[in-house]
Amino acid sequence: MPKALQLSNEEVSKILHLKLLCKTVKEILKLLNRSKSMIYRVVTRKTPYEPKPCSGRPCVMDICSDTWIQRMASNQKMLVCEITRASRMQISKNCVHRRIIESNYMIHAKMARRLPLSKLHISKRLWACNHMSYGDKWMAVLFSDEKNGPDGNIKYWYDL
């Protein structure tokens, strides 16, 4: 879920003032149109309001490294693993991939899945493979514009 917008100092002071006027949390959230948890956080904290600290590992990358990664992916057509190796930072391939996807001007799409070959395609491919080794004999073959003859077979004539 996306992070909620932070409360301004005016909103924090309004919440604290309404609480001093013995208003309930439900009344405050209706008046200010903010979430219940955000109002509870302001009311229960003993210190001045500060946003909750983020958990997890701190981010290694900054804006400059993000733009460098996006430039490498778009201009030089480098793969994710190549960009990871070329960077001087200790980052994972997933991190690089995520930065490329998060950029607004890069389009991320999966390749369309191909259907398996049908029996007809396989037989046509095998015919082509069998006749590839003709070499100079192909110079003696004449092709017509017609695909199939009246009997359904491929037309070709040998010039003997």
Image: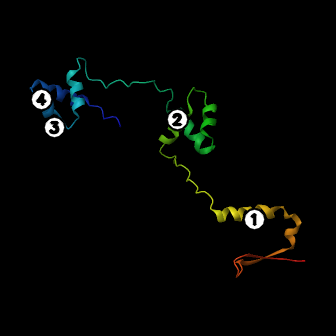
Task: Please name the residue shown 65% across and 65% down the image.
Answer: 120
Find numbered disc 4 in the image and state the secondary structure of the residue it sits on: loop
Q: Which residue is identified by label 3?
A: 30
Per the image, label 2 sits on a secondary structure element best described as: helix
SS of the residue at dot 1? Answer: helix
Q: Which mark is residue 127?
A: 1
Mark 3 burial class by Cα count in 10 Å: few <14, some 14-19, many 20+: few
Q: Earlier in the sequence, mark 4 or mark 1?
A: 4
Residue 111 position in % (x across, y down):
56, 51
Residue 17 horizontal/vertical position (percent): 14, 26
Quadrant in which residue 24 is drawn: top left
Q: Nearer the viewer, mark 1 or mark 3?
A: 1
Residue that mark 4 sits on? 24
CA–CA distance between discs 3 and 4?
A: 10 Å
Q: Which residue is mark 2?
A: 66
Residue at image position (19%, 24%) is 43
Quadrant location, the N terminus:
top left
